[in-house]
Amino acid sequence: MNQIAQLPARVRLAGISKSFASGKQAATPVLSDISLELEQGELVCLLGPSGCGKSTILNLIAGFEQTDSGAILLDGSPVNKPGPERGVVFQQPTLFPWLSVLDNVTFGPRMAGVKKSVYLPEAERYLRLVGLQDFHHHMPWQLSGGMRQRVALARAWLPNPEILLMDEPFGALDAQTRLMMQELLTSVWQKTGTTILFITHDVDEALFLADRVLVMSARPGRICAEFKIPFPRPRDVEVLVADVGYGALKQKILHIVREEARKSMTGTAQ
Ligand SMILES: Nc1ncnc2c1ncn2[C@@H]1O[C@H](COP(=O)(O)OP(=O)(O)OP(=O)(O)O)[C@@H](O)[C@H]1O
């Protein structure tokens, strides 16, 4: 089904590096000469040890931070500030507690002065896609954690972004809710064709979601391994775990991630 190899890269990171200074200390290199591409409609998961720079990559693509060197290109044009074509979903849904579900989801277009007749049908569509069609008038405190994250997902998808940047969005959810969210995400993604960069610490999550998994090294972060995920879609977690190739691939990825985590703990990264 996947014809991404013939399509142009939607996002290209060309040799980017990034350091952060802290107080009077010399700047610490966080990312070193990272090059990667996200193809149109591709779902790529980024794994790596804590502190290796995964969120920094996402923040650079989102335009929240600037690179020290190298370029970030979106459809060939340089990125240096946030834009509506890039949606972001964080681990915490960050909803406005005083606004209803519908008002949270439509906050962006309302502030941008988009006509209600334009944004309302789309908001209703996304709320239906995430299974919240009966919760338009609920307040965030009346929702479960998973429901709040579904509101955040609908809000991020409403402007119809070309790219969705997701930073451990299901990391705070229990295992069952997380699995349901993964199924929900892939089903909406297959309907919209959005390009997704998804950060996770969970190899099973990456294997369920991704077309491709990138593994980062200990800091300063580089892409040290890449895996194409061969399992057909739509994926079913029970079928996946019974697949003989699943365990072998999981073990291979886990080995690299743990090795890099060990280096980052013992400070032996190059
Ligand atoms: N704005 C900032 N100012 C200073 N240092 C920063 C800033 N953002 C990130 N860092 C540093 O950059 C390094 C990488 O952080 P980042 O959040 O990208 O890692 P990560 O791989 O996403 O970690 P985790 O998996 O734990 O979330 C850390 O040492 C962090 O302290």
Image: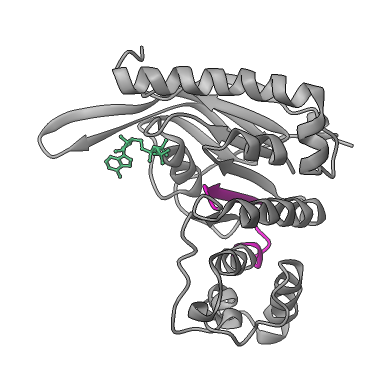
Q: Which quarter of the image is occupied by the N terminus?
A: top right
Reply above or below: 44 against 182.
above
In depth, the one of 29 and 201 nearer the eye is 201
Is residue 11 among the parts visible in the rendering? Answer: no
Residue that extends furthest to the left in the rendered view of this protein: 24
Residue under the point 74% across and 44% down: 41
**Residue ID at (74%, 52%):** 183
Point out residue 89 in the picture as x, y percentages from the top left corner.
53, 56
Residue 157 part of the magenta segment: yes
User: Which residue in the rendered view is the most extreme toward the right?
Assistant: 1
Residue 29 image offset from top left, x and y in percent: 30, 26
Q: Quadrant of the C terminus?
A: top left
Q: Is residue 20 visible?
A: yes
Question: Is 146 left, or right, of 216 in this rendering?
Answer: right
Colour scheme of the rendered structure: one colour
Q: Which residues make up the magenta segment? A: 156-169
Q: Position of residue 129 (x, y in %)?
A: 76, 67
